[in-house]
Image: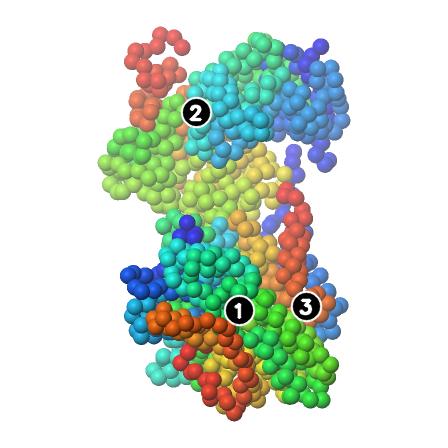
Amino acid sequence: MPMLALTQLFKSYGDVPVLKGIDLSVEQGEVLALVGENGAGKSTLMRIIAGLAPQSSGTMDFEGKRAPQTLREAERAGVVMVHQEFCLAPHLTVSENVFLGRELTKGIFTDRQAMEKASADILAKLGSYVSPRARLQDLPVSDWQMVELAKAFAREPKLILMDEPTAVLSGTEANQLFDRIRLFRDEGGSVVFTSHRLDEVKAIANRIAVLRDGQIVRVARASEISENEMAEAMVGRPLSEIYPVRQKTKTRGEILVDVIGLNSANAVIDASLTIHKGEVLGISGLVGSGRTELFEALLGLRSASCHSFELNGQRRALPHAREAWQLKLAYLTEDRKGKGLLLGKSLSENIALTKGALSGRNWISHRVENLDLVTVVKEYDIRAGNYNATAGSLSGGNQQKILIAKTLATDPDLVVFDEPTRGVDIGAKQQIYEIIARLADAGKAIVVISSEMQEIVGLSDRVVVMRRGQISGELTGEKIQESEIIRFAMGLQEELTHV
Amino acid sequence: MLRSLKTALVAAAMMIAGWGIEANAADAVIGVSIPAATHGWTGGLNYHTKRTIDTMKKAFPNVDFVLTTSSSATQQVNDIEDMVARNINALIVLPFESDPLTQPVKAAKAKGIFIATVDRGLGEEGIEDLYVGGDNPQYGRAAAEYFKKKFPDGGKIVVMRGIPTAIDNIRIEAFNAALKGTKIDVLDMQYANWNPDKGFEVMQDYLQRFPKIDGVWAGDDDAALGAIEAIKQAGRKNVTVLGGSGMNKVVKLVKDGHDMVDADIFYPPTLIIPAIELVTMKFATQAPINGRYVLGSPLITKDNAVEYYFPDAPY
Amino acid sequence: MSDVTLNTTGAPTGSGLTITRTLEAMGPLIALILLMIIGALTSGTFLGAENLSNVFTRSAIIGIIAIGATFVITAGGLDLSVGSLSALVAGVTILFLNHSVGALGSGWLLISAGILFSILVGAAAGFLNGYMIVKGRVEAFIVTLGAMGIFRSIITWLSDGGSISLDFSLRDAARPIYYGQVGGIAVPIIVLIVMAVIGEVVLRRVRFGRHVAAIGSNRHVALYSAIPVNRVRILTYVIQGFCVAVATVIYVPRLGAATPSTGLMWELEAIAAVIIGGTALSGGFGRIWGTVVGVLILGFISNILNLTGFVSPYLNGAFQGAIIIIAVLLQRDRSQG
């Protein structure tokens, strides 16, 4: 008997149908991956299984009985959800978060020691050694994901639902997570997860279900379906090359930015770098190696000092935040919800925000902004409920496109894309790659920071690798391959013979 | 942090005012605890207190003073405890409220400190050695008598109450009692908190509500000033306004003649002066001083106004 | 695919009285209308022109201050010192006027100089607050709480705990500022409406206003979007100081004096008006016309309590508190989308 069985599940929000007749089963001791474009219905399906939302019609059985309808019932039955948007309290410590709502007690007092020990054990099994006493707000985002996972495992689940679990993890951390998942599966537990990283999906899932437009269009064993076939099933049409072809004849343009000896707190140590017009410079490295910090330091978003900084050959001081924009140097943050977009405001306002702040013109013309919005929606193929939607109501991929539109509206000479395709579905990814290629061909200087090795290899003309705040290596041409990048990222001396 | 900030501010203000008083080898230290200058009357109180202390220090250099001003009953309790810890010999206190201050003052008495209470007593009888007070029931009666005399055949008056405290209750009770059986019609009593801005607003609304008003008892002179402006703006004639407390501005109006104000009730903040003088003399000259002194609240009229007029005082 | 109904979301133009579509926006207005109905039913004089003018005029003082507070709060800040600042500005302006009679006479030249003087003092105080908060990186709550104490202490010291009065010769020259009328409408009401209109336009249609809301919505996003965050935040406090000064200029001629109770609790009333009106206390969204409605609600509540006799004066405070809570609840009627 399958652990979870969904039969003819329908779900509509108002008159908008989201799930149109889902038939799916999850066996005991199995890892099932759900893939699909943003808007296909993955998150909705997950939420229904987790008990966060009721289905409109159809049945759902868990271990042969009627499946739990509320979150509490679900958790008690052993169905636990790990969210993409962390459900954590930043002011509390790691162990407090792991046991939130289920504190261990000694008499009437909470048993802090027991909780800290238990948290440390669970985290260690996940491969994380973060201190259970650390306050969440002091930890980097990848540790948050680990705590979120630890929280789930602490509930002794039978079925774990994960939404984009590796979105903020580095390669090694993801591997550790997969090991834990395999262990869990071998012990009889089941996992359903969604991910946009198709290579990972193939690596860890037993079976893969492809969701498109609210229906399951294909279910296959992981060994029987390739990444390309997955992607094609997701979009419903054959895919051409994922990474766009660049104009080969272009030689590298002149130097736009030349910085020597950049330092910022303990995050960036003596970094020197040149950025050329017309090229895509990839920045790689493990999470925590200082890639984001380097460019935030360069563009005035964190305090820094340097030996020298030249822009278009002119020596000058490092710009502060607003100045950088005025000098046509743009930074597109990896934290689109926290630092990129005003989630409560409209799309038109978000798109016009930076451009307006630089324009020096005092009056806001709603008419012009609305026209700009129409143009952006068409050009970037943005899916929103209506033009008055707030930025917060859009899916991750669409939000990213809005952020890109907002950044490019200022017509910068340098654009630093920090994790541009994190949490973005394959269709949108392709579009973003197109944009990057076009910008570079038009003579802009483009920097792409990414934790997805493939992305770096596929997009970059040149790659700079960082390790522990320093630049550990630079690669061009043929040398741009995953093995070389890993070598510099981990500080290994000899070339790896195989990966 | 907030408390230390406030304490620092109070200390700074005291220093700026020119007299950081510290007890050092003197024959006696007298602690004085009064409410802070939050409205006109307490402003005057603070002024007279400081002046008297300065005068006494000059006259009797062997006596030292510690002064605290408190903005609430709770703070006053803390301030008194602090002073007791500094080993004062006597405590002159104008309690913010009688009940909450009873315990700390009793504790001070138990340490052998000479207790003088001003303006109002404590929750229990017999704690203080010296009492200098105003006569709140007389205050209310004086106002009632004034209107009875003004309108012997009856009249319509409105009343403004003060800050909701025991004093206000006592005055109003006495006022109401004195008006029983007369033909004076009290149309309404709303709170103006002895505040000119509130007095202005309440008066405006009274004028809207009652087409005929013969007299206004504003509770005290601050509220009366506000009431006067409102009546002026509305252009109403033949309205008599009575305040109270003897603010110099209003006494001047009485003295010079004013179409609305021709009387005031004397209840000045200067009643702290005899208290301080008496206690100082007890320690400086070893004269035995005990007892209860209740200062009257006479009605000030044009005839005697000049006696009650202190143009240089802030109140 | 998805519905792409094109709705040009035009903002309210000009006057802050344009009514928006959602129930949430209408909340404070509904509360005001309900209150006026209650007033009309319980008192024959409530709807009289004189009474309405009285209340509107009285409310203008807090109202003008609250307009400044709307900017501060929308940017995510807070200013608790406005009441004490009013007392301080009132006091020093009166002193300035009294001392300058000799040099400037006692006509419009002096009055104008006095107005300019008080605006300078108010704006400077606002700047000091803003600087400490933004550059000094001290919490707004703490800085303005301290400023509240400092301003009040200074004026108490200057006045020896008493009142500071305008010279009699100046009283008549200054009277029209509060008691005068233009076209049958009291001067303070006109000033309030003009400032409200300007405020609403700035908040909705001018770049600066958008920056204020963006900063209150998410300060990081504002910084990452080339907005001059520090400059804008400090400016909101300067605007608040300016508004306090204007309100004080209107207030002084009413009694012709600054008293120790001037400004007492004004900051709470101003902030309450802002919140009732629909501006979010945590920042990010401001509604000036809502603030004006909020101020009127507060003014009408005490007016109705004075005009009617049936609520014991002991319970006035409870009545006021209840109405404020209801007004805010009416706004939050719709759950967040």
Residue A458 in the figure: left or right of residue B212: left
Q: Residue at x 36, y 26 (%)?
A: A289
Q: Nearer the viewer, mark 1 or mark 3?
A: 1
Spot occupied by residue A164 in the image (x, y as percentages of width and height): 54, 24
Residue C328 in the figure: left or right of residue B271: right
Chain holding disc 3: C
- In which quarter of the view is residue A346 placed? top right
Cα gap from disc 1 to disc 2, whole angstroms: 62 Å
What label sits on residue B120 in the rendered view? 1
* Residue C274, above or below C215: below
Mark 3 lies on residue: C304
Q: SS at mark 2?
A: loop
Q: Residue at x 56, y 47 (%)?
A: A370
Mark 2 lies on residue: A131
- In which quarter of the view is residue C306 placed? bottom right
- In which quarter of the view is residue B81 placed? bottom left
Q: Residue at x 57, y 9 (%)?
A: A186
Quick check: can you spot residue A385? yes
* Residue C97, above or below C220: below
Which residue occupies the foreground of this view, A152 or B267? B267
Spot occupied by residue C61 in the image (x, y as percentages of width and height): 53, 68
* Residue A305, above or below A120: below
Spot occupied by residue A498 in the image (x, y as percentages of width and height): 38, 8
Q: Amino acid at mark 2?
A: Ser
Cα gap from disc 2 to disc 3, whole angstroms: 61 Å
* Residue A188, above or below B249: above
Quick check: can you spot residue C181? no
Q: Amino acid at mark 1?
A: Arg
Q: SS at mark 3?
A: helix
